[in-house]
Amino acid sequence: MTSPDCILETRGLEKRFGGVVAIASVDFRLKQRELRCLIGPNGAGKSTFFKMLTAQLKPTTGQILFDGVDITRAQPHQVSRLGIGIKNQVPDVFNNLTVAENISVAARSRHGKARAAAKGKDVMERLGLTALTGRLVGELAHGQRQWVELAMVVALEPKLILLDEPAAGMTADETNKTAELIREVNKSAAIVVVEHDMQFIKQIAQTVTVFHQGRVLIEDTMDKVQGNELVREVYLGKSEDD
Amino acid sequence: MTANWQGNGGLVAATVLGLVLLLALPQIVDPVMMIELTSYVIMAILALSLGLIWGYGGILCFGQSAFFGIGAYAYAIAVINFGDSTIPLLLSIVVPGLFAALLGYFLFYARITDVYFGVITLTVTLILYKVMGATSGSQYVIGAAPLGGYNGIPAVPPLNLPGRPDVALSFDGLFYLSGLTLLAVYVGLRLMLKSRFGQVVVAIRENERRAELLGYDARFYKLATFAIGGAIAGLAGCLFANWGMFISPDVFGLAQSAQVIIWVIVGGTGTLLGPIVGCFAIQWIATKLGAQQLLNANLVLGTILIGFVLLVPKGVVPTVSDALRRLKFRPYVAPLVEQRRVP
Amino acid sequence: MIINSSVNRRSFLKTTATAAASLGLIGAGGRAFAQEDTIKIASLLDLSGGLDAAGKPMQDAITFAVEEINQAGGLLGKQISLVTYDTQTDMRLYPQYAQQAALKDKVSAVFGGITSASREVMRPVLRRLNTLYFYNTQYEGGVCDRNIFCTGITPAQKQSKHVPYAMNKWGKKIYTLAADYNYGQITAAWTRKYCTENGGQIVGEDFFPLDVTNFGSTIQKIQEAKPDFLYLVLVGGAHQSFYRQWAAAGMNKQIPMASTTMTIGGEQMVLSPEETNGILLCFNYFESLDTPANKAFLERFHKRFGADYPYVTELAMATYQSVYLWAEGVKRAGTAERMPVIEALESGISLDLPSGKFSIDPQTHHCVMDINIGQIQDRKINILESFPQQQPLDTSGVCDLKKNPDDNSMYVIKV
Amino acid sequence: MDLLVVLSFEALKAVASLALISVGLAIIFGMMRVINLAHGEFLMLGGYAAIVATKAGVNIWVATLLVSPLVVGLFGVVIERTIIRFLYGRPRDTMLATWGLSLFLVGLATTVFGNTTEGISAPAGSLQIGDYRIAAYSLIIIVIAIAVFAAIWAVFRFTRYGLIARSTMQNADMAAALGVNPSRVYAVTFGVGAGLAGLAGGVMAPITGIVPTIGAAYVAKAFITVIGGGPAILAGTVSASVLFGAIDQIITYLSTPVIGEVALLAAAVVLLRFMPQGITGRFFRRAA
C-alpha cells in the first residue's frame, strides 16, 4: 500500500527496447502537491519515464501506482481520466483547430458545456491567450504553441501534471511567467518538471531527482544536488560547457 | 465555440436552399432526368458517409461500398420476407451499422491504422463481393428471398407507407424521400460535428495521442464514427435498391469503392459540402462519358483522380472557398463551408 | 457502331426542340426522320465491358434487320428508327436506360439484355412503363410475363437433345463445369436431369464465378473423376482460359467436350483450332446451315458488314429474327401500339427465317424452332443432326399466359 | 500416390505464381514504402506486351521473358518521374494517385485493345505423371519464380546497386552519404519493381488470358502477400506465398476456387489483425 500522502509511486519500473535498457528498476515516490524537478543528460530516460506514467509506453516490468490505483496496464485515456496531465516535449496540439477549440476539447473532457466554457475562458485569461482565441494553433509561434498545450493540461484540472521541458524555446520573460504559473498550479496539483534550464529549475525547485542511464542517481534538494560530485561529473559539468 | 458564428446562419441557409431545390426540381426537369437525379442524390448520401469517416474521422476506409451493399441487401431480403417496408428500412441502417461496429472493434481496438486499415477494408469488401457472387445455387435462400449470386435480387419491392404495403413509393416520391434524407443527413452531421462528440472526433483526426492524453478513448470515438458512417451508407444502399428495384454483388465491387473515394477527394475532404458536390460532378461526367464511345470512362476518372491528388489535393470546395476567402468574400462564403480540413 | 444515347441534361424545359435534339439523331441507315414519320425501337446491349463479345454481334444484327426492313419500304409506311444504348455490362445502367427508352424515347419495343440478371432488372421496368420487350438470348427458361417475348433457346429444347447425343457418342459419365449464376446453375440442373434420365451419371459438377481464370486444380479433379466427356456451361472472357489450360495439359486429346455457350461470343475465332476442335454444340442457328434462306441472308449480311465478318452468332441471329417477328406483329396489328401488337403476336405468328421455321408459342411467349447439333472443326461447325420444331416444354410446364394473362413471374423450374 | 504428387505440384505452382505476381510490389513497397495500387495493371500491361509481341512474330519466350519486363519497367520509370516522386512521404496520397493510375490504365487498355479476352497458347506441352497429365508450363512457372528470386537475392547480396538499395532502405541519408542520388535509386527501384510485375504478367498471360480488368484479380492477392510477408522482401514474400498459396490451393481442391480465394483473403485479414505491431512497426516507422 502507498501511504495516503503519496500520489505517485513506481516500483521496480523497467523498460527495455530490444536489448537496450532505457529505464532500469526505478522506484519513484511523489507526495501530494509536491513539485519535483527531473534532470539528467540526454538519453537518461526521462521522456521514457514520462511516457510510461501516461501509458504511452507499456513498462517491461514493474508497477505504477497513482493515487492508490494500479495504472501499469491502463490505456492513455484512462490515466488521463484518473487525473494525470502531460505536456510532451514537442508541442503536442491540434494544429488545425483554433486556440479556443484546443482548450475547449480539453475542458470538455472533464466538464459539461457551461462549466467547460467558463473553465476555458479562465485558463486562457490566466495564460494570456485571450487575444489568440480564433487563431489556428498551427499558425502560431513555437512558444505560443507551448502555452496552448500548457493551457490544455491546466484545463484538465489534473491531480498530477507532468511537464516535459515547458520552458524550451521561450524568452526570459516567458520563462518567468511559466515558473509563476507552475507555482500557482502547484497549489492544487502535484507537478513533475523535466528541464535542462538550471536557472528555471532554481526558480521552482524543491526537490530534484537526477536520472542517469535509466536509473535514479540521486534525489535531494537543488543545493545538495548541485554540490554532488557525481552529478557534476555526469551532468552539470558537461551541461555548463555546452 | 468560435465555430458557432459561422454555423447556424449557414446551416439555415443550406437547409432552405436544399428544400427549395427539392421542391423546384421536379417542376422544371423532365421525368427521365429526375430518375437520374434521384440516383445522384442517393449516391451523395453515400459520399457524405465517407466524407464523415475519412474527412472528419481521418479513417482511410477503402470499403465504404461494403456498408452500402449490406444495407441494400438487408433491405431487399427483409422486405421480400416481411412485405411491409418499415422494419426492412430500419434493418438497412442497423445491420450495416452493426457490421461497421464489429469490424471497427476488430480493427480499432487492435490499433490498426492508416494504410493497413485501407487494405483490410478493401479486402473485406472483396470477400463480400466474392461470397455474395457465389450464392446463385438454390440452397442460398433467406426466408422467401433467394440471394441470386451474380444475378443478385431482382424485383425488390419498393418502400411503402408504414403498415400499408399496398401504398408504394412512386418515382417522384423516391426523389423527395432521397432528397429529404440527404438534407437530413447533411444537417444532422453538421450538428453532430458541432457537438462535443464531433469536436473530439476532429481532435482525434488532428492528433490522436493528444486526444487520448486529454482523456478521450480514441478507439471508441473512431468506432462510433465508423459505425455512424456505415449506417448512413446502409441507408443509401436501401434507397439505391429502391431506385433500381434490384440489387447485385456489383455494389461491393472495386469500381464502386473507387467511385466513392473519387467523389470525396474531388469535392474535398474535411467538408460535408465537398463530397456532395464531388459526387454530383463526377456522376454527371460519368453519365456523359457513358453516352459516348470516344473516351473511356475509366480513362477520364483515373486522370481526374491523379490530377486532383497531384494538383488539387484539398479538393474543389476547400480550394474555392480558400480562394474566395483570400478575395475577402469571407463573410459570404464562410457560412457555407463548415470546417477546416487537413492541410 | 451506331450510338445514340446522348441526353441533353442541361435542358430544363421539355420543349420539342430539346427532345428532337436529343432523340433520333440516327435512324436506320443513318437517315434522320421527322419524329412522327418513324416507329422507334431501342436496343439495350452490352457493347463494352465484359459481355461486349456477345453484345456487339447482336447490335450488328439488329442494325441490319432494321436497315433491311426500311429498305423494303418500312413498316406501315413508316421507317423504323433504332435508338441504341450501350449498357456497358453495368447493372446500374439496365434499368436506367430501360426507363429512358420508355419514357423519353417512347419506343414501341425494346430489344436486348444478355444475362438473365439484366433481363430481370429491365423486365419489371418495361412492364410498368407499358413497353414491349424482346429478350433474345438462350437462357434457363421460366419467364412468364405477357409483356415479354423470349426468342432464345431454353433447356428443354437444347439439353434434351444435346446431352443424350453426347452420351450416345462418348459415354455415360459427365463432368459439368458451369458459370456460377442462375443460368449456369439451372442449366447444370437440367443437364443432370437429362443425364440420369438416359441412364448416365454426373461424376462431378463445379461452378465458377465469371472472373475465375485459374482452372488448374479443377483439371486435376476432372482427371481424378475420369468422366467420358465434359459438359461446359462456361460464360465470358475469363472462362476462355479453361480451354487454353485444358489444351495445355494435353487433355483435349483425352476427354471430349460439349459446350452450351462456345461460339456465342465468337470464341472459336479467338482460341486456336487445337483448343476448340471437336467441341460439340447445340443451337438453333449455325452459320453453316445449308438452307437457301440462310445462304441468302449471309450473302446480304456480308455485303453490308464485309466478307471477313467473323461469325454470325446464335444470339445475333435470335436478335435479327426477333425484329422480324415484331415487324410481322406490327403489320398484322396495323399499329405499333403495345397491346394490339402483343395480341397479333399471340395469334400464332410463324415465319420462315434463316434458322428455319420460327413460331411464337402464344401460351408462353417463347418460340418453337429447329434445333441443330454441330461440332467444331478448324473454326467451322459441321452440322451432325437436326431436330425440327422443338417446343419450349420447360416453360410451358409452369406458364400459361392464355389462362393467366396477368402472370408476372420468373419461375425457377423444378427439375 | 500419383494424385499426391500432382496435387503437391499444383500447390507448388500456386505458391510460385503468388510469389511471382507479388515480388514487384514487394520491392516497391518494401524499399520505397510506396503502396502501388496500380500493380495489377502493371501485370496487365506485361500480359499485353507479351501478346502483342508474340502476335507480331516475336518468339514467345523472348516476348514473355524480355519484352514484357522491359516495356513495363520503362513505363514504371516514367510513372515514377511524372507522378510518384511528388508524393514521397505521403502514403495516403500515393495510394490514391496509383488507384487513379490503375483506373487510367484500365481505360487506356480498353480503348486500345477492346474489352475482349486476348490470349496466347501456352508453349511447351504436357507431362504425364502416372495416370495424370499436367501442363509442362506449370513447371516452367515454378522454375521462373525460383530464378527470379535467386537473381534478386544475388543482386542484393553482391552488386553495388544492391548495397545502395539496402542502405537506402535503412536510411535515405546514408545513401546520400555514399554519394548516390536517392532520387535515382528510387526511380531505378520503381522501374525494377514494375519490370518484375511486367515479367509476371507476361509469364501468366498464356494461362489466364488478358483483359483490361484482369489487374483487379491480382492486386488484392499481391497486396496481402506483401503485407502479410513482413519487412524482409524476399523471405517475407516467399513465406507469405507459401502460406496463402497453400491455403488457397488446399481449400480450392476441397471446395471451389471461390471459397479458396475467400479463405485466402480471410486468412490475410486475420493475420494482419493479430500481427499488426510486428508488421506496422517495422514497415511504417518512417512512412507513417
Image: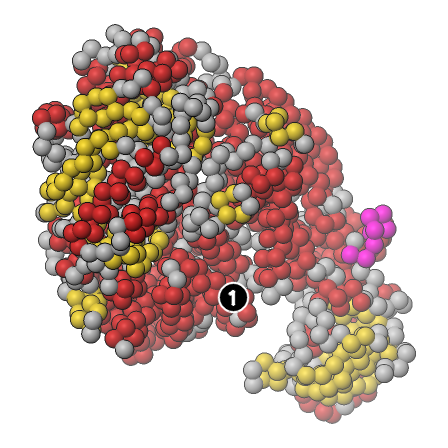
Q: Is residue D281 visible?
A: no
Q: Is residue B180 shown in magenta? A: no
Q: Is residue C409 left or right of residue C322?
A: right
Residue ranking furthest to the bottom: A229
Q: Is residue A114 shown in magenta? A: yes
Q: Which residue occupies 56% across, 39% down?
A: B80
Q: Amino acid at mark 1?
A: Val
x and y, in percent, of residue C186 in the image: 36, 45
**Image quarter of the N terminus of chain D:** bottom left
D89 vs A176, nearest the viewer: D89
x and y, in percent, of residue A22 in the image: 63, 82
In the rendered structure, which segment of residues is drawn in magenta? A109-117
Q: Alpha-carbon neighbours of circle 1 within 10 Å: few (<14), some, or many (≥20)?
A: few
Badge 1: chain ID: D
Q: Which residue occupies 43% across, 70% down?
A: D229
Q: Quadrant of residue B294?
A: top left
Q: Is residue A117 above or below residue C104?
A: below
Q: Is residue B6 left or right of residue D31?
A: right
Q: Is residue C8 above or below residue C239?
A: above
x and y, in percent, of residue B237 in the image: 55, 40
x and y, in percent, of residue A229 in the image: 74, 92
Query: Which residue is tagged 1?
Result: D270
Q: Is residue D129 visible?
A: yes
Q: Which residue occupies 65% across, 81% down?
A: A60
